[in-house]
Each structure stands twice: as structure tokens, then as C-alpha cells.
Image (cartoon, rainbow, N blue to C red):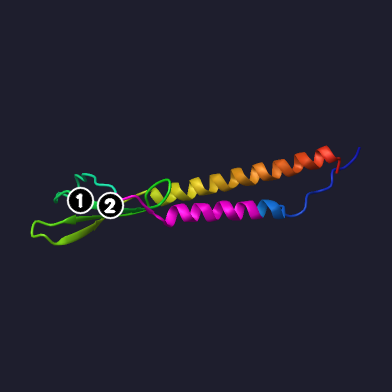
Amino acid sequence: MATVPRRGRFQIHLSTAIVMMFVAGGLIWANVTKQPSRVTRWSELEKTDPMYLDAYGWPCVVKAIVIFETSDGELDWYPMPLGWSIAIDVAVALLILFAVWSVCEWLIRRRAARKGD
């Protein structure tokens, strides 16, 4: 009965690490760039209609600031409560990184099996 050698510590290939680094950079970029300003009605403001909304985060908005004009013509701002947005964004980012890792490592294993290594 042949024994299977025990796997060493967790390792990934250099090419996988490079691809994951680019994907992580894209995810960071998507989360820190300002989303397009939108004019929306926010019922919880109970103020005048907002002029625009600064929103950050992907796929969920993590930070949002509504800027509106008060009755005396001054500009005011209101930070929007966002709840579970950060947890959802982190979960999506980890899921994407795990999928990229799985695909890259599968392609490397498949190529090695074809070559007979």
C-alpha cells in the first residue's frame, strides 16, 4: 500500500499571487472611487430634496453623504446610515479573491497534469 506524501504548508504559485494582487487592486479602486452623483429623494431626511449624493463603495455603498440646500439657502450635509454594507463588501471581495485563486490554481494543476509533472 503506497502512502501519499503529506502536503506542506499552504502555498500558492507566484503567478496566482500576481493575478490576485491585480484583482485586489481593482477591488480597492472600485471601493474608493466616488460613485456618480445621483439626485434622489430621501424620506428620512425630512428636508428639502438633496442636491447630490457622494457615495463610495462597491457593490454596496459604504459611505454616503447627502448634500442639500436648507430653507435659508445654505448648503448642509447629512451622512447616511448604511448598516451591513461593509460586511457585504468584504464578503464579496473575499468571494471574488477565492474564485480567482481557485481558477488560477486549477489552471496550473491542469497544465501540470497534461505535461505529466
Residue at 39%, 46% in the rendered image: 60
Magenta-drawn stretch contains 32: yes
Three-letter residue code for mark 2: Leu
Would you say 30 lies left or right of 24 here? left
Within 10 Å of the Cα at label 2, are there few (<14), some (14-19), or many (20+) other Cα atoms? many
Residue named by callout 1: 50
Where does residue 89 sit, x and y in percent of width and height?
45, 49
25 vs 4: above or below: below
Q: Quadrant of residue 77?
A: bottom left
Measure the C-alpha gap from mark 2 to mark 1.
7 Å
In terms of secondary structure, where does tag 2 sit? strand
Query: Quarter holding the N terminus?
Result: top right
Would you say 20 lies left or right of 79 here? right
Residue at 87%, 42% in the rendered image: 3
Q: Foreground: 69 or 101?
A: 69
Residue at the limit of the structure toward the bottom, as seen here: 74
Q: Which mark is residue 42?
A: none
Query: Quarter holding the C terminus?
Result: top right
Confirm whether residue 112 shows in the render: yes
Residue named by callout 2: 53
Residue at the limit of the structure toward the left, as seen here: 72
Task: Check whether the beta carbons of the residues at disc 2 and disc 1 lie within 8 A of each other.
Answer: yes
Where does residue 15 sit, x and y in percent of width and height?
70, 52
Where does residue 25 sit, x and y in percent of width and height?
54, 56
Q: Quadrant of residue 65?
A: bottom left
Residue interval drawn in magenta: 18-37
Magenta part, dominant SS: helix
